[in-house]
Amino acid sequence: MAKKNRSRVADWVENAVLRTLIGGLLLLPYERRVPLCGWVMSRVIAPLAGYRKRIRDNLALVLPDLPEEEVRRLVMKVPDNAGRTVIEAYSGKEFLRRAGESPVTGPGLATVEEARATKRPVIFLTGHFGNYEASRAAMSARGYTVGVLYRPMNNRYFNEHYVAAMEALGKPAFPRGRQGLGGMLRHLRAGGMLGMLIDLHMYDGAPLTFFGETAMTALSAAELALKYDALLVPTYAVRQPDGLNFKIIMEDPIPHTDPETMTQALNDSLEALVRQHLDQWFWIHRRWKAAMRR
């Protein structure tokens, strides 16, 4: 019981600190708060939370020949992008307006437009890259309703306002697990569109590859696409050099074959884009847990 209470106290304290930081930043103009949150994440939070070491460890595993100068740059730039993403998610209408103006390019757009006209379901697959919410905001601004599947935060106090901020950027939002499964399936059966992330470690996933190393990957997106005849479209929001704006890239849909082949194609798609913009992927994640234990 005591351990459980201490955990609740720690969660409450963590949430209070984060809410204070976010609340203070939201008092600033958008063009100042976004880079400032990136700076705080990169210079203050990242070293305290051990993010710098985790970034280095991940890079050493999958890109061992990367020059030290580039590693040092990524150790600073990756948390900066993560911090910008956090405060953008809490910036509501300001973020929606800016992200909504993002150009949408790529061969997948015409196919998605045709799917909407015929009420064929679409699953947009992305990763923790750039700001993954920007692509949903851009599609919402064009009249699309894109639901999102998300994993609830472990800190229940933080999760309450995290979900509220996510829903402010567009509904419906479905939590992973039994709670959100029914609503998500009804949404797809009705010809809806759904956004999912592909790049989190899943203990019960398939042992596929990402950057040449085993990465346990959920097959659920491909399985849903096959079951409901949904388009499976890799879609990414690339942060632009000004650090505030985005370009949305919508690739050709993944051909329907089998879940493993389709999901590996998604991993390959994300890897190809990350290699072009190494500082925009969240190298903070423990993506290769099995490989790290070797």
Image: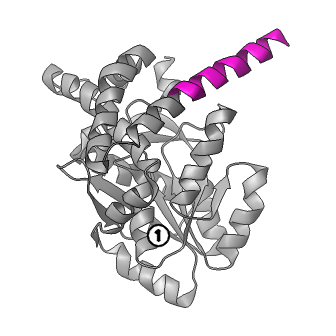
Name the residue: 32% across, 39% down: 81
Image quadrant where residue 138 sits: bottom left
Left of 196 or right of it: where is 45? left
Instruction: Write down the region rendered in magenta.
Output: 1-17
Left of 247 or right of it: where is 201? right
| Number of other residues with Cα within 10 Å of mark 1, as a class: few under 14, some 14 to 19, many 20 or more | few
Foreground residue, 244 or 221?
244
User: Where residue 118 sits in the image (x, y, percent)?
Assistant: 54, 89
Q: Which residue is the site of mark 1?
A: 255
Name the residue: 69% across, 76% down: 189
What is the magenta segment's predominant secondary structure? helix
Residue 282 falls inside the magenta stretch = no
Image quadrant where residue 157 sits: top right
Left of 31 or right of it: where is 199? right
Instruction: Locate the N terminus by quadrant.
Output: top right
Foreground residue, 112 or 27?
27
Type of residue at label 1? Answer: Pro
4 vs 119: above or below: above
Name the residue: 32% across, 62% down: 98
Foreground residue, 263 or 21?
21
Residue 153 in view here: no
5 vs 234: above or below: above
Name the residue: 61% across, 35% down: 158
Residue 6 falls inside the magenta stretch = yes
